[in-house]
Image (cartoon, grey):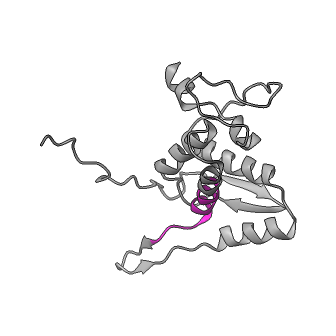
């Protein structure tokens, strides 16, 4: 049997040199938040799949939720003495409480999740012009359905980005 290689062995670590990296921040309901963690590439793929209708809308929403949670949670880390400091989800919990208390609508939460995605992916997603039926332009082989949330519809399909 032929081996395809080893994958996932070199986990990407966030490199921060004290005093040189400027933190990414955003305001939400009048409070400022600092991005703490990186969205795993697999979540980015799931978000892209949801934008093209290749996975159920609920899977896309779960990926957006998880992207926000990961972005705002201070990751588990090792101190110089070798002791492990557990992950700290306080900022995500604060955002959650604000969103519920202020009745922030789904579109605004999705805009935030997409901004986090764009910042970490290194490029903005492009919103496609609205079509009469609200669906994105896709190839004839696409399985996008009209049940896809409008915020997911506006994402540029991965095939369009890779195709030029």
* Predominant SS of the magenta segment: helix
State the residue at coordinates (61%, 46%).
Answer: 117
Provide the residue span drawn in magenta.
64-76
Q: Nearer the viewer, residue 20 or 122?
A: 122
Residue occupying image coordinates x 74% and y 42%: 151
Number of on-image labels: 0
- How far across and how far down the image is residue 74, in percent? 55, 67
The outermost residue toward the top is 164
- Residue 164 percent across, percent down from the top left: 53, 18
For the N terminus, give its image quadrant.
top left
> Height in image: 136 above or below 44?
above
Placement of 33 over or under 12, stated as above or below: below
In the drawing, does residue 152 fall left or right of residue 43? right
Image coordinates for residue 19, horizontal then vertical, percent: 54, 56
Closer to us: 108 or 119: 108
Could you tell whether 140 is left or right of 154 in the image?
Answer: left
Name which quarter of the figure residue 67 lies in.
bottom right
Q: Is residue 49 above or below residue 140?
A: below
Residue that appears at 64% across and 49% down = 116
Observer-nearest of 77 and 118: 118
């Amino acid at each position: 049997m032929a081996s395809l290689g080893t994958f996932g062995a070199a986990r990407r670590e966030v490199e921060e040199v004290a005093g040189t990296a400027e933190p990414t921040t955003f305001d939400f309901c009048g409070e400022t938040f600092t991005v703490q963690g990186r969205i795993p590439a697999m979540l980015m793929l799931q978000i892209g799949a949801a934008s093209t209708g290749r996975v159920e809308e609920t899977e896309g929403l779960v990926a957006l939720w998880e992207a926000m949670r990961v972005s705002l949670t201070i990751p588990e880390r090792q101190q110089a003495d070798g002791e492990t400091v557990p992950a700290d989800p306080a900022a995500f919990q604060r955002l959650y409480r604000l969103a519920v208390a202020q009745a922030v609508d789904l579109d605004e939460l999705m805009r935030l999740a997409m901004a986090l995605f764009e910042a970490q992916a290194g490029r903005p997603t492009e919103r496609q012009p609205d079509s009469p039926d609200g669906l994105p332009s896709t190839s004839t082989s696409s399985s996008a359905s009209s049940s896809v949330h409008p915020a997911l519809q506006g994402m540029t399909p991965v095939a369009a980005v890779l195709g030029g």
